[in-house]
Amino acid sequence: MTGSGGIVVGVGLSTRATSDEVGVLVAAALAEGGVDRAEVRCLATIDHHQQDPRLTALGWSVDGWGADELAVVATASPSERARLEVGAASVAEAAARLSAGPGARLAVPKRRSAHATVAIAVGDGWPRSPSDRY
């Protein structure tokens, strides 16, 4: 599975999510999508989790997006709970699509554990980071 914009794993997590829970959920999504760990360009999440050790421990760089940026991305699985808690109806799907760049598609839509969400996006455009705004 490849895309010129790269493969990005979006992650949403609550304060109760553990490192193990996040790691298991990411691994399961990669397996579901047939994605090798080495193919992943980065993780993507809401900006206040960008330096979260539960994400940085996974070994990829982490893009962080503001709630206002996440809120304008149309997603397959919006969450009213997320909208109320963080100001955006999606973190995992929206962050993955933003970081994967224009034309990105969801290869694995949002998957949930008790305290985390994960989605995988494949970019059809150039690789993107929050410093490369539209």
Image (cartoon, grey):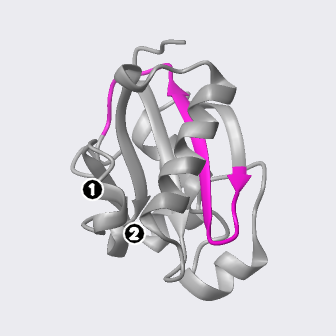
- Name which of mark 2 and mark 1 comes first in the sequence: 1
Q: Which residue is mark 2?
A: 66
Please name the residue that numbered disc 1 is placed on. Answer: 56
Q: Quadrant of the C terminus?
A: top left
Query: In the rendered view, would you say 48 is above or below 109?
Result: below
- Residue 113 among magenta residues: yes
Q: CA distance from mark 2 to mark 1?
A: 18 Å
Q: Is residue 75 depicted above or below 97 in this figure?
A: below
Residue 132: image x %, image y %?
25, 44
Badge nearest the viewer, 2 or 1: 1
**Stretch in magenta:** 111-128
Please say whether residue 101 is visible from this viewpoint.
no
Residue 81, above or below 128: below
Picture quarter containing residue 79? bottom right
Residue at image point 40% right, 69% down: 66
Residue at point 66%, 79% (across, down): 83
Q: Residue furthest bottom?
A: 84
Looking at the rendered structure, which numbered label has been put on residue 26? none
Query: Could you tell me which quadrant the N terminus lies in?
Result: top right
